[in-house]
Amino acid sequence: MLQTKDLLGLAEMRARDISKILDMTEAFKEVLQRPIKKVPTLRGKTVVTLFYEPSTRTRLSFELAAKRMGADVSNMSISGSSVEKGESLKDTVRTIEAMGVDMIIIRHKQAGAPHLVARTIKGSVVNAGDGAHEHPTQGLLDLYTIKEKKGDIKGLHVAIVGDIAHSRVARSDIWGLTKLGAKITLVGPPTLMPPYIDQLGEKHTSGENKVSISHSLDAVLPHVDILYILRPQLERQKKGLFPSLQEYIKLYGISKERLTKARPDCLVMHPGPMNIGVEITEEVATSLQSAVEDQVLNGVAVRMAVLNLFLGGTHHETI
Amino acid sequence: MPIQKTTKVKIKSELCTQIMDKDALRRTLSRMAHEIAERNKGCHHLALIGIRTRGVYLARRLAEKLSHLEEVKVPVGILDITLYRDDLTLLNHQPVVKKTDIPFDITNKVVVLVDDVLFTGRTVRAALDALNDLGRPKAIQLAVLIDRGHRELPIRADYTGKQVLTAKDELIDLHLTEVDKEEGVYLVSCKNS
């Protein structure tokens, strides 16, 4: 099925391969609902998570996914490791591989780092987020959540709101959603909207973009099926990228009142972690329209499917 | 890790013999349903679990026959064993995982596993492991439409439709109207020249 040993981004994946992963995810979600949440599929396989950037949620999600599949998992923490002694990324992963590891899951602040690792080792590499480039498993879990709630992605209109410039989640979602037939409106302050970002993603066969840009959330709200909210990184405020938190909240924060401008069946999503009271209120996050908790559970299931895809399966064929 | 490649084998000539037609299939399933009811002295505490994919359709047909015989509705579940198989169980090199759907508790039930063909026994071994993770049945029995021999594990069927002598490289193909538009069991010999 897949021509590659690695999951580095959704941009280079075929729509039908993305769909296949989403189809497989349902089976793994069923495993997560059993009293004994374990299958022996990846017994004997070793997975290492290598996170150069902090993350407890994504790392835990990968770790649980691997453990539910019966694999051995080890988390490498960068602080207190040889990386502080100046060991290069290449040497680090070569050393890990030499210990007999089948897959490395890497998060790194430098875009392209997972690609370098993929070229360096024979094992599989999964990108858990590289700079502002992509976060493919987040994209996949978002697609799965939308598909679960809305039935089909084709024809949906999704608004992604917030700091698009620094968001790898937004980019992976753009690729995944456009490949599966949705259209996207990116909403945010002009200072956080990269120029020509509407050229990203798969285009219509006519050449027309599936992505458009707006700076007014209220204008976009009545027309969307999905409202995907990004967290503004508050450090950017200090750099003058938006004048004040109050202004951001006024223009782009989703409160219960603002949500009434959207359709009643509009789905609210957030990749987490949330700044409650800033881009989203507590009420909205826990409302019936919110799929945030589903996203978290689906994240483990999707990652199980991804692990199974690359580490499961046979190498020999007999009846 | 080597990239998994698809190996295509050209089948030069195929010999296809029908070993069961539509009516034979129907009668055999009726007989099996009677045997299941007889052995278990009725259908109380019984559950049929079909192994994907064709085992599921057979399980449903058996459940229907049992409901006519005993006037009891026997629950039917779907078991996908892809996550439990060993390397030598299935043909697929990149298995498509489908959902296991058993909407009832199997603990304390007599579970009859249903599959179309019993061959090496590895699929059934995987099914037993899967059931073990889902509960503690009172007993597990095995119903297969065709037993083609060549067991590699100490596994045997409680209810057998038909025993067929086969060579290891032959194939047994079950066609069901739910999937294949016609019904029958075929023995396929592939000759590579």
Image: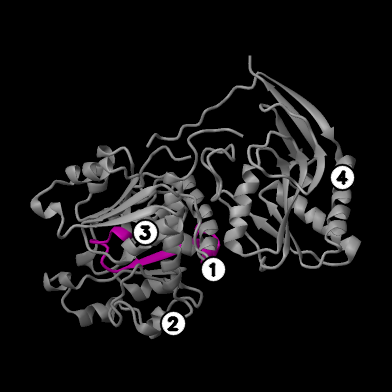
Q: Which residues are magenta?
A: A147-169
**Separation (CA) of disc 3 from disc 4:** 48 Å
Residue under label 2, please give it: A260
- Disc tally is 4
Camera-side residue: A227 or A272?
A272
Give the amino acid at mark 3. Phe
Q: Nearer the viewer, mark 3 or mark 1?
A: 1
Residue under label 4, please give it: B28
Let me know if marks 3 and 1 both belong to one chain: yes
**Separation (CA) of disc 2 from disc 1:** 39 Å
**In the rendered view of the protein, which quadrant contains the C terminus of chain A?**
top right
Tell me which residue sits at (48%, 76%) in the image: A263
Residue A59 x, y percent position in the rendering: 31, 61
Could you classify mark 3 by the number of other residues whose Cα lies within 10 Å: few (under 14), some (14-19), or many (20 or more)?
A: many
Residue A191 x, y percent position in the rendering: 19, 66
| Residue A62 numbered mark, or none | 3
Give the amino acid at mark 4. Thr
Residue A112 appears in the picture as rendered? no
Q: Single out the residue that lies furthest toward the left.
A: A85
